[in-house]
Image: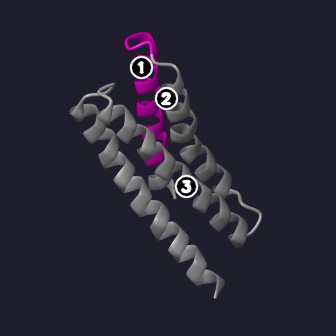
Amino acid sequence: MSILKNKSYEFALEIVKLSQYLVADKKEYILSKQLLRSGTAIGALIREAEFGQSKKDFIHKMSIALKEANETLYWLDLLKDTKYIVEDTYSLLHSIYKELVAMLVSSIKTAKKSLL
């Protein structure tokens, strides 16, 4: 779980930096707030899942983290396509996003198998 925790924290740091940039340099307040909320929620939910009350609670929280990751990608896509962020920034975050999603899906599948 620590690799996932570290990766989600790294992602959250990048999201915070991007949000700060969008507000300070681009004067963009709405999309940046949405991105900040969903992008940092991923790691918070992973941390919550770590001490879930049951295997089902763990799966539930990890599934919500996966949904937040998907929402974050929506905001990143929108920011890229509206030219608020450059391709390099998008590519870096998209790369981390893909790793996070793969780890989340794997963790959820593994946890579901242990329920059987």
Question: Residue 63 location, x and y as percent?
Answer: 59, 62
Residue 11 magenta? yes
Q: Is residue 70 left or right of residue 89?
A: right
Q: Is residue 16 above or below residue 64?
A: above
The image quadrant that residue 14 belongs to is top left
**Comes first in the chain, label 3 or label 2:** 2
Question: Residue 99 location, x and y as percent?
Answer: 36, 55
Cα–Cα gap, marks 1 and 2:
9 Å
Residue most extreme to the left: 88
Q: Nearer the viewer, mark 1 or mark 2?
A: 2
Q: Is residue 54 left or right of residue 104?
A: right
Residue for point 43% across, 11% down = 24
Q: Is residue 48 left or right of residue 89?
A: right
Residue 76 magenta? no
Q: Nearer the viewer, mark 3 or mark 2?
A: 2
Residue most extreme to the front: 82
Name the residue type under label 1: Leu
Nearer the observer, 62 or 34: 34
Q: Which residue is mark 2?
A: 31
Q: Is residue 14 above or below residue 26?
A: below
The image quadrant that residue 15 belongs to is top left
- Tell me the tag on residue 67: 3
**Comes first in the chain, label 1 or label 3:** 1
Q: Is residue 116 left or right of residue 7?
A: right
